Amino acid sequence: MILLALLLPSLALYAERTDRNDPPVKTLTWGARIGFAATGSFLHDAYINGHEYTEYIQDTQVGNFAALQIRLNTRKLLIQSGLGLSFNKSSFNLDKNSWDLNSTKKDIISCSYSMVSLIVPLQFGFNIINSHPYCMSAFTGPLLRYTPDKYYSVEYVEYNQPYHFTDSPTRIILGWTAGFSVQIGRTFLDFEYEVTINNVAEPMHENTGVNPIPDYRLNRRASVISFSYGILF
C-alpha cells in the first residue's frame, strides 16, 4: 500500500500531461502472477458448553499463491478472471474461562489449519489511469475457492482434556475481493483483500468417543491480504 501511495501521484501527473490520442492499454491481456497472502481468522460463532465467546487472539500467517489471469479492458472499465492455486494457513487461540470474570486460570483451546485451494475470481472494476504503457485500476468481485479434503489439515489443542476435535474443509468457499492494480509496460503489481462469506470448515466433530460429547461451535471465516507480482505475455 505504501508503494501504491508513492506511485499514485507520479502516475496521475503523467496522465494529466498525456495526449488524449495516445493508445490505451490493450483490450485483451493475459499473464501470470505469483505472490504472498497473509491469512487471518475471525470467529463469528464461538459457543462452548453454554457460553458464547466474542474475544479471541488470531495469529495471521503468510502463505503464497500463483495464478493465471485474463483481463478485458475498455478505456474506463475492466473485467478480469483467471485460475490460481493458493496455500493459506492461519491459527487462533481462545480462553474458555474468559466468560467468567472471577476466573483466575486460563483454559486455552487453540486451532491451527492450512489448506491448498483452487481459486477462480470474477472481478469488475474501472481504470483510474489507462494510457500506454501505464495503467492503474481498482476492482472488486466474488472469488470461489475449492479445497479438497486431502489438502486441508487442522489441529485443535486443548490442554488437560480427554477429547479431541477435528473438522473437514468446506469444499466450495465463497469470498469477496477488493483491490488495486498498477501496470507499467508488461509488468504489474496487485494488492488485494479478500473476506470469505461462508465458513472455512464444516462443523466440528469429536473423534475419541467420550461421553457426554461436549457442545462446541467454533465457526470461522478467513480474511486474506495479498500482494503479487505479474507479467503479461
Image: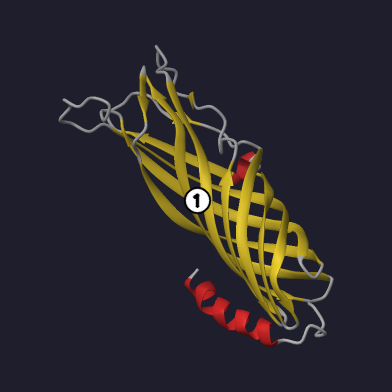
Place of residue 47 in the rendered image (x, y in percent of width and height, measured from the top left): 41, 24
* Near-viewer residue (65 or 148): 65
* Near-viewer residue (206 or 72): 72
Q: Residue at x 62, y 36 (%)?
A: 170
Q: Residue at x 76, y 67 (%)?
A: 76
Q: Indicate left or right for 96 with 18 as reference.
A: left
Place of residue 113 in the rendered image (x, y in percent of width and height, measured from the top left): 48, 44
Q: Residue at x 78, y 65 (%)?
A: 71
Residue that lies at the very extreme toward the top in this rendered image: 212
Q: Which residue is mark 1?
A: 89
Q: Quadrant of residue 30?
A: bottom right
Q: Quadrant of residue 36?
A: bottom right
Place of residue 208 in the rendered image (x, y in percent of width and height, measured from the top left): 44, 23
Q: Residue at x 52, y 45 (%)?
A: 222
Place of residue 114 in the rendered image (x, y in percent of width and height, measured from the top left): 52, 47
* Near-viewer residue (126 or 49): 126
Note whether 167 is above or below 162 in the view shown.
below
Q: Quadrant of residue 188?
A: bottom right
The disc labelled 1 sits on which kind of residue?
Lys
Note whether 166 is above or below 124 in the view shown.
above
Total labels: the figure holds 1
Q: Indicate left or right for 100 with 223 as reference.
A: left
* Mark 1 residue element: strand
Q: How many residues crowd mark 1 within 10 Å: few (<14), some (14–19), many (20+)?
A: many
The quarter of the rendered structure image containing the C terminus is bottom right
Q: Indicate left or right for 220 with 133 as reference.
A: left
